[in-house]
Image (cartoon, helix red, strand yellow):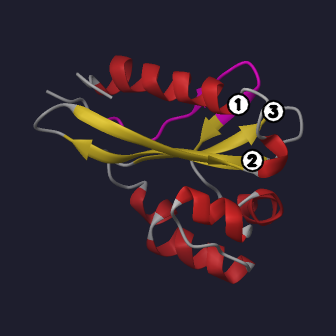
Amino acid sequence: MLTHVGTNTIETDRLILRRFEYSDIDSMLRNWIADEQTQWDYGEPYYPTPEAVKELFDTKYIVSYSKDDYYRWAVIEKESGECIGQIAYFSVDTNNRHGEIEYVIGPAFQGKGYATEMTRAVIAYGFEKINFHRI
């Protein structure tokens, strides 16, 4: 049985994975969400304005944190305080105890091992906190 605990803060050596906040909008726009190619590679539309990101928050991201089975983290680089991407369990199968991970990292932050660092942390969270059988 899964133990749905929702999106809680996870800290790694160089990153803080936490719930999105409205204060993240500017750094998201600078680093990844307004970049058409990055978002295309991620399989999502790009969001070119603060208003578009706010609408995304209000209709999907922040509004969904009220659900215990919703897992989406803003990826914050500790050194800069910038939101450099996101990681989520986009598909959670409660009956079969598994989840699938998706993530995006802004181009300026790629090739630095951040994806590996954050994915390891989210996998550990999935097995240790949510009780996934398979990820």
Residue at figure coordinates x 73%, y 65% from the top left: 25
Q: Which residue is mark 3?
A: 78
Main SS class of the magenta portion in the image? loop
Q: Are marks 2 and 1 in contact (CB under 8 Å)?
A: yes
Picture coordinates of residue 114, whole percent (x, y): 70, 31
Q: Is residue 101 left or right of residue 30?
A: left
The answer to whether any part of residue 6 appears in the image is no
Query: Magenta region: which residues?
Result: 5-16
- Gap in angstroms between the C-alphas marked 3 and 1: 11 Å
Residue 15 highlighted magenta (yes or no): yes
Residue sticking out furthest to the right: 80
The 10 Å Cα crowd at callout 2, few under 14, some 14 to 19, many 20 or more, is many
In the image, 108 versus 11, the foreground residue is 108
Q: How many marks?
A: 3
Amino acid at pointer 3: Lys
Q: Are marks 3 and 1 in contact (CB under 8 Å)?
A: no
Quarter of the figure with residue 50: bottom right
Amino acid at pointer 1: Tyr
Number of the label disc, if any, that sits on residue 84: 2
The answer to whether any part of residue 86 appears in the image is yes
Q: Is residue 32 above or below residue 71?
A: below
Q: Which residue is mark 1?
A: 114
Picture coordinates of residue 92, whole percent (x, y): 27, 43
Amino acid at pointer 2: Ile
Mark 3 vs 2, N-terminal side? 3
Residue at figure coordinates x 27%, y 22% from the top left: 131
